[in-house]
Structures are given as structure tokens and as C-alpha cells.
Amino acid sequence: MSAMKWNKLGKIFDPTHHKLPNGCMQFAQSPQALVFDDFVRIYFSTRSVDKSSGKYLSHIAFVDMQKNLRDVIRVSDKSVIPLGGLGSFDEHGIFPMSVMRHGDAVYGYTCGWNRRVSVSVDTAIGLAISRDDGLTFQRIGDGPVLSASLHEPCLVGDGFVKVIGDVFHMWYIFGTGWKKFSSDAAPDRTYKIGHAISSDGINWTKEEARQIIPDKLGPDESQALPTVIEIDGRHHMFFCYRQSFDFRNNRERGYRIGHAYSDDLANWTRDDMNPLLDVTPGDWDADMLCYPHVFECDGKVYLLYNGNEFGRYGFGLAELII
């Protein structure tokens, strides 16, 4: 396998410099690209404060950028998709939303968040469809298209969907459970990357509870946000991974970018070192690298990602050098 390298191009968007919808002021998490003929639309999750509880609500916004991925054309001024209704799986936030073109529509696979009592959240994956080139999305129903099941008991989310041949493939995460890692700590979650297929993008069959990417840090490794691209006939997955506890403020246990490759979409070989994307001391991504999204634009392969504080101050870009 030929050597690959990421060339970091720096932070390209800071949400604190723009007026965002829904009263959001910080966070541009999990950037996801939709490429147009003459610009790139990048969706992200931003946050407002729930006045009734003082807790965050995650909303979807977007920024349109020139294809140099430097110059901002505009930032969305209206809700891309409203949050779910009372008691629904996406009542308290959508983070992330992964988009893909299908025919003349844009499919948005949402990760809906809802608060729990004994643990902080649960998640599931929904589908919303845009008929106006991705400006607004409408749910196909109030419930999820992929959620917890017999051997995937919680925290199904981060769905990334790609049509290969006539088959919809979804890579997503599923929770293996919650655990208190110390007696005085809140419970923390662990999740792994799984795979499902569909003929229509709506009705899915999981490879139930099959962790497709091996652990590097041991059983308490959490893996998140898979994204897949084909390069020279081989499928490459980028994702982020971390320790399941003491990761928020301990840079040695925080998120990093992982990589795996496959020739058959079934068996994946983990190879985080090729290409290696690592922290830059003293920079906006000195403490963590998280929430990657890989895409092709004008013959180049780019990776969007968040840095310190889980994307509070925006996202950056790297270009793949092969």
C-alpha cells in the first residue's frame, strides 16, 4: 500500500465570527460536505441553550464556501431542520447530520439526541429528505430508521451512508453500554463502529453487534463518526477514537483520527499511521482531533475535522497527498 500523508490547511471556519440561526453562538461540530458545481456547502452542528433546563440543544446549520475552501459565501440564517417533538428520539438535538445526493434529492441521516435520567443521553438515526438542494430537510417520519436493538442496546448514531452498486451501506456507531469508571464520576459510554445495508436507504439490516474496526486502546476505546471514501479501488474509512473516560480535559486520552482500509467492504485493516493526522502543539487542534469527514472535490481528497473542545471554535481542513 502506497504511503499517504495529510497536509493540514488550518482552521477554515469559526462559528463565533458569524450570526447563526436559533440563537446559537458557539460550536461547529461534525462538518459534513455537499459539493455543488461552483461551491461547497458544509453542514455542522451548533448549540443553543435550553432555557427550561440550562442545557445545550444541538441544531444543524451550514456554511457555503468557495471551492478554495477558504472564502465564506454565506451562512444559513434559518433552521435547516427543526428538532423533534416532545418525547421523540431527536427532541434535544441533532448531531451530526450526514448528507448524500440521491436522484434529485438530498438525503440527510440525522443523529438524534434525547436526554435520560440515569445517564445523560441516548441516540438514534433518522432520515430527512431535502427537495430544495439541501436548504431545508423534512423528516420521513417522527421515528428513527436505525436504533437500539437486541445486541446493540443504546447509542446508535453517527450514520454515514454511501450507495455502492445498488446497495445502500451505512457505517454507524452502537453503544456497548454505560459504566461508572469511578465512584464519584458520572457514567460514561463506550461505542463501536458497525455496518448495515439497505435496498432503499430506509429499511436497514444490521450486522448486529459486529464491531468492524478492531480496538487500538483496548475494550474501553470509543470509536465515533465513520466516513468512507474509495481511492484507487480500495475503500478507506476515517473515524475518531478515544478512551471512554477522563477524555474531556486530559489531552492524552482525548480524540484522535483513526484509519482503516478494506477491499471487500466486509473486512477492515486498521492502519492509523498511514496516513497519520496528529495534533499540532500550540495550535487550535493541540489537544484533540475529532469528528472527521472525508470528501472529494475537483479531484482532490479533503478531510474536515474539529479540534480542541470538540469543535467549540470551529473546524479545519486537511488535504490528502498520495
Image (cartoon, rainbow, N blue to C red):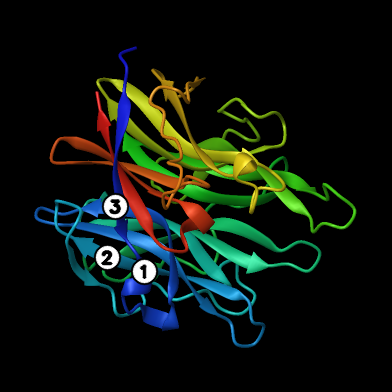
Q: Distance between the residues labelled 2 and 1?
A: 10 Å
Which residue is at the far top? Answer: 1
Q: Is residue 21 left or right of residue 58?
A: left
As drawn, the label of residue 33 is 3
Question: Label 2 amino acid?
Answer: Val
Question: Label 1 amino acid?
Answer: Pro
Is 241 drawn above or below residue 3 in the view shown?
below
Assess whether mark 3 and mark 2 are in contact (beta carbons under 8 angstroms): no
Name the residue rendered at 37%, 45% in the picture: 293
Indicate the secondary structure of the residue bearing disc 1: helix
Tell me which corner region of the image, top left, top right, bottom left or bottom right, holds residue 274: top left
Which residue is at the far front? Answer: 282
Name the residue rendered at 42%, 53% in the picture: 284
Q: Where is residue 3 in the image (x, y as percent from the top left)?
A: 32, 17
Where is mark 1, residue-wise? 15
Q: Is residue 44 left or right of residue 69?
A: right
**The C terminus appears in which quarter of the rendering?**
top left
Residue 78 visible in the shown view = yes
Of circles 3 and 1, the one toward us is 1
Which residue is at the far left? Answer: 38
Where is mark 2, residue-wise? 63
Indicate the secondary structure of the residue bearing disc 3: strand
Q: Where is residue 186 in the image (x, y as percent from the top left)?
A: 79, 59
Is 126 drawn above or below residue 92 in the view shown?
above
Of circles 2 and 1, the one toward us is 1
Name the residue rendered at 42%, 63% in the picture: 313
Q: Which of 220 and 87 is in front in this view?
A: 220
Q: Where is residue 40 in the image (x, y as percent from the top left)?
A: 20, 55
**The N terminus appears in which quarter of the rendering?**
top left
Is 125 drawn above or below residue 258 in the view shown?
below
Q: Where is residue 18 in the image (x, y as percent from the top left)?
A: 31, 75
